[in-house]
Image (cartoon, rainbow, N blue to C red):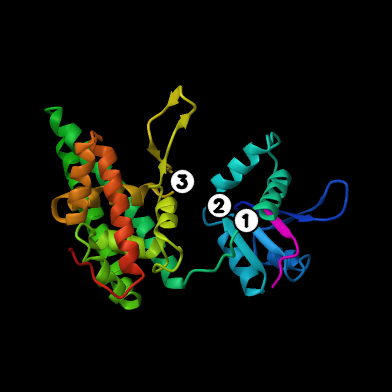
Amino acid sequence: METKVHVGIDISKTSFNASIPIKTKEGYKHLKYSNDIDGFKKFVAQLEPGNNCVMEASGVYYLQLALFLHEQGMIVSVVNPLTIKRFSQMRLMRAKTDKKDASIIAEYGKIEKPVQWEPRPEYMLQMQQLQALQDSFTKQLARLKNQKEAFVNSGIINKISNEILDLEIKHNEDKIEYLDKELLEITEEFHSDLFKRLVTIKGIGKKAAMCLIVISNGFNRFENSKQLCAYIGLSPRVFESGTSVKGKAKICKMGMARMRKLLYLCAMRAITCNKACMEMYARLKEKGKNGKLALIAVANKLLKQAFVIGNSQMIYKEF
């Protein structure tokens, strides 16, 4: 279906603004609806076949509208909010209103022509929720353990405080273990073979394998490993200009902090057991690279290995 116009949608928890390009002085027809089924129906009535509805991935608020539009046969594109922010800055946009944001998103769609969004399977959304909940409990567990350590190091710890902290620590550990089992069951039900192949990569554990499956939608979401690395935020960003500006090379953190931390831990393990990663790490250290930068490169290497295994029927083998 040929795209006629790109409709920009700025969405929030309770409502959304839409900007539909029209031939007027202002250039857009601005509409506002409630972020619920009644608002969705009214909005669809204003659209024509071939319209591309472009919206930001604003938390979970965009999902119901995106699913509804997709079910109605509309073309939908979901883009990174940071991409829209940078697009707006490039055009020196100063105004910040819901209407203006919607028109900027529409302009972005017209110029950049973002790819069409496809809804993820329900089980993938369930895994995302379980992983997010597990991440929350993991952070809470770390805070509790740090709190107990601080009390112990003070030399004085209240008996009741100690008992409560021990109970809370055990409670969080039990919840994390339970979520692990639930995630593993879903993974083995829908991606058993892929999961088994991914964990053959030395350095990639069960948790990392499950996270990669969810992020990549079973390795069907990205065309190449560079796209996967960029999404997670492990792509290098060079900071140089002319002969005077020579900044440090950094990773482009547009992706997922939780996955980066997990891959960093995987890299630490991989440099002790994964031949290709061991050789890369040693080579970079010999060139004078610092340990952190070398580990990030190893994490990138692990992602590339995972992408190859994820898009083939092979298991990992060292040569």
- In percent of the image, x 54 and y 51: which residue is there? 80
- Which one is in front, 223 or 15? 223
**Residue 34: x and y, percent?**
69, 58
Identify the residue at the far left of this view: 155
Picture quadrant of residue 189: bottom left
Above or below, 90 relative to 20: above
Are the residues tagged 1 and 2 within 8 Å (C-beta)? yes
Q: Left or right of 241: which side holds 180? A: left
> Where does label 2 land, which residue?
58
Q: Is 57 placed left or right of 41 in the picture? A: left
Kindly report which numbered mark, 1 or 2, lies closer to the viewer in this rendering.
1
User: Dot 2, crowdedness within 10 Å: few (<14), some or many (≥20)?
Assistant: some
Rounded to the nearest angstrom, the CA distance separating label 1 from label 2 is: 8 Å
Residue 137 visible in the displayed image: no
Local packing at callout 3 (Cα closer than 10 Å; few below 14, some 14-19, many 20+) is some
Magenta range? 1-9
Q: Earlier in the sequence, mark 3 or mark 2?
A: 2
Residue 255 among those drawn in magenta: no
* Residue under pointer 3: 254
Q: Is residue 85 or residue 274 the one in the foreground? A: 274
Q: Are marks 1 and 3 in contact (CB under 8 Å)?
A: no
Q: The disc labelled 3 sits on which kind of residue? A: Met
Disc sitting over residue 55 in the figure: 1
Quadrant in which the C terminus is drawn:
bottom left
